[in-house]
Image (spheres, rainbow, N blue to C red):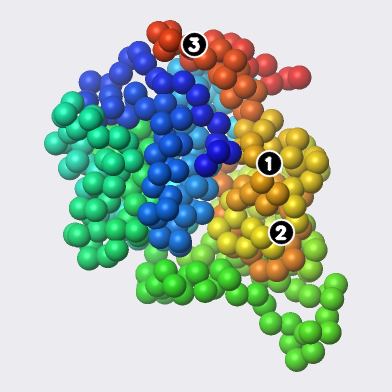
Amino acid sequence: MEEIVFHQAERPNLPAHPFEAFLHEQSEEDWAQAIAALLPHIHKVDQNATRIWFHFFPLALARALERAPDPEQLARELLLQGRYRLRDQIDESHYFLYGHRYWPTIKRAVIEFAERFSTGNAQLSLAEQIREVARRASRDLGVAEALTIGITAVAFMTVRQAGLEAVKRAPGTIRLSEWALRRTPEQVLKARARDDRQGLFGFLRTEDKVWTVTFNENDPEAHFKLVHTQEIAWAAASDKRPWHLRDPRCVAGEGPIPVQCRSAACGTCWVGVLGGAEKLSEVGKLERRMMPRFGYIDTDEPRPIIRLSCQAKAYGAVSIVIPPWNGYFGKLLKGEAADAPKDGAEDSGDRIIESSNLSS
Ligand code: FES
């Protein structure tokens, strides 16, 4: 997961609870290494979803907000819009993982693990601890461990960002239809890989091919059509349902993806790509330049799993996830990198915030 920005370990003001203290001591690089180590063991259905979730809820941003003297002011400086705090969406932030269906059990298993946690546990790496909890939960659920690892990693990070008490207080309920609950991982993967049939003489079609863009795999109604080579956000605008009633960032009549500039300047339209990233156009110069500025991803990959939907053109059916927030915090990450102390002795959080000048 080289594309996520990770820096120094956290130090002062550790929570009193040993499990939370352990999580707070994990640097962003520790988290990146843990996810990289876990990824091969995660079922294919949740490999991209897990990576996307960690992009959607970056620790660097959570830490900056935790340490800001005035978090609301910082949020305004970072142009944050929507629901960017995990503590406000403990039970639903991960709705797009297949493992979301196991959340009540995973949540319980993580809380039990936290209650038993002692400093002796800290001998195990973050990845080993996640696997231990995932293994226990998979036995309780009677499912393959591979299906519980991604959602368990998400649960660990949720405890880190929202706090153990908040996680305990969350109801731990999920809202999935019978249809969604019945689907097997194989059916989900098959649906992701499927391209639309183009009719009897579809093989003759070229530019007028039409593809389906799915934006919530748990909802059979959550899709719109895209004309071959059209940008995803432009195609979304053909969906005239009142999505602004669900997400106030959406513009009435402009579809389910929030948009503002449509020219890679605002960062509003970012999406995660669960399936079909290879059927999108390569990242262009503008998108490449702007993504690190927004803070969403910093990678040389030609077709990464995080895209600006106003720039990404589709050449086939794709499955995407729309994040619940957007912002402009790349400079904050850069400031953090520049200010990171070498010996881990000093809290750089306040200086990160002071150094974030987003106006230029
Ligand atoms: S709508 Fe502004 S970057 Fe895509």
Instruction: Tell me the residue at 75%/91% (across/down).
Output: 200
Q: How many neighbours does mark 3 have within 10 angstroms: few (below 14), some (14-19), or many (20 or more)?
A: some
Q: Residue at x 58, y 71 (%)?
A: 193
Nearer to us of marks 2 and 1 is 1
Residue 218: tell me if it is visible.
yes
Would you say 80 lies left or right of 128 here? right
Three-letter residue code for mark 1: Asp
Q: Residues within 10 Å of mark 1 (few under 14, many from 20)?
A: few
Tell whether label 3 touches label 2 (CB within 8 Å): no
The label shown at residue 319 is none
The image shows residue 39, relative to residue 327, as above or below, that is below
Q: Quadrant of the C terminus?
A: top right
List the residue tagged with mark 2: 280
2 and 1 marks in contact (CB < 8 Å): no
The label on residue 341 is 3
| Residue at x 74% of width, y 82% of height | 198
Q: Residue furthest top?
A: 346
Earlier along the polypeptide chain: callout 2 or callout 3? Answer: 2
Q: Secondary structure at mark 2?
A: loop
Q: Residue at x 54, y 73 (%)?
A: 191
Residue 201 horizontal side relative to residue 211, left or right? right
| Marks 3 and 1, the one that precedes in the sequence | 1
- The spot of residue 157 in percent (x, y) is 38, 38
Q: Position of residue 154 (x, y in %)?
A: 38, 45
